[in-house]
Image (spheres, rainbow, N blue to C red):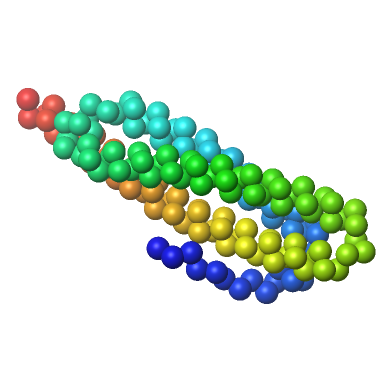
Amino acid sequence: MENKAHNYRYIEWKTPDEMHFSSLQWKSELNFIKDEHRFFEDMLKEHTMPIIESQLFSRVKDLIERLTLSEKELQILESTVVKHINRLRKLIDDLDEPKEGKFYRKEHKSILNDVIHYSRQYKRLKREIFEAVSIALKQQKQKRLLA
C-alpha cells in the first residue's frame, strides 16, 4: 500500500508546545509498539509446534520476516521522532527564526504521515499474527479432542 500524504492544515496553527506534546505521544506509541514486538516474538516462539502441525509454517515465516522488518522501520522512525523533539527544543530557544519554524512544521507533517502509515501497517500485521496463531491453536485443540 502506498504511503498517502495527508494535508494537515491545523499543524500550521499549532504552538510549539502542542507540537511537542504530539511528538511525545508519537514517542510513547512507538515505545508501546516496541514492547508489543517482543510479545509477538515470544508468542510465536511459544506456539511453534502448533504452527508447524497446522501447516501454517510458511505463512508464519512470512509474518516473522514482516515483524523483523517492522522492528527495523520502528527504530528508524523512533530515531526520527527523537531528533524532531530535540530540534523543537532548539527552535523554542531561537524564536527569532521564522524560516526554521516553517521548516519544522513541514517536517512535523511529514513525520505525522510516517507515524500514521507505520501504525496502520503494524495494526494489519498484528491482526494477521493473531489470526495465524489462533488458527494453529484451534487446529491443535481439535486434534486433541479427536484423539
The answer to whether residue 28 is above or below residue 93 is: above
Q: Is residue 141 visible?
A: no
Image point (51%, 47%), residue name: 73
In which quadrant of the rendered image does the C terminus lie? top left
Say left or right for 63 vs 120. left
Say left or right for 85 vs 91. left
The answer to whether residue 109 is above or below residue 58 is: below
Image point (48%, 41%), residue name: 71
User: x and y percent of residue 129 in the render?
Assistant: 34, 43
Q: Quadrant of residue 1?
A: bottom left
User: x and y percent of residue 53 in the render?
Assistant: 16, 31
* Number of numbered callouts drawn: 0
User: x and y percent of residue 117 in the render?
Assistant: 50, 59
User: x and y percent of residue 136 in the render?
Assistant: 22, 36
Image point (50%, 54%), residue name: 118
Say left or right for 47 vs 110. left
The answer to whether residue 28 is above or below residue 91 is: above
Closer to the camera in the image, 122 or 68: 68
Image point (61%, 45%), residue name: 78
Q: Is residue 4 visible?
A: yes
State the residue lying farthest toward the left.
147
Closer to the camera in the image, 117 or 94: 94
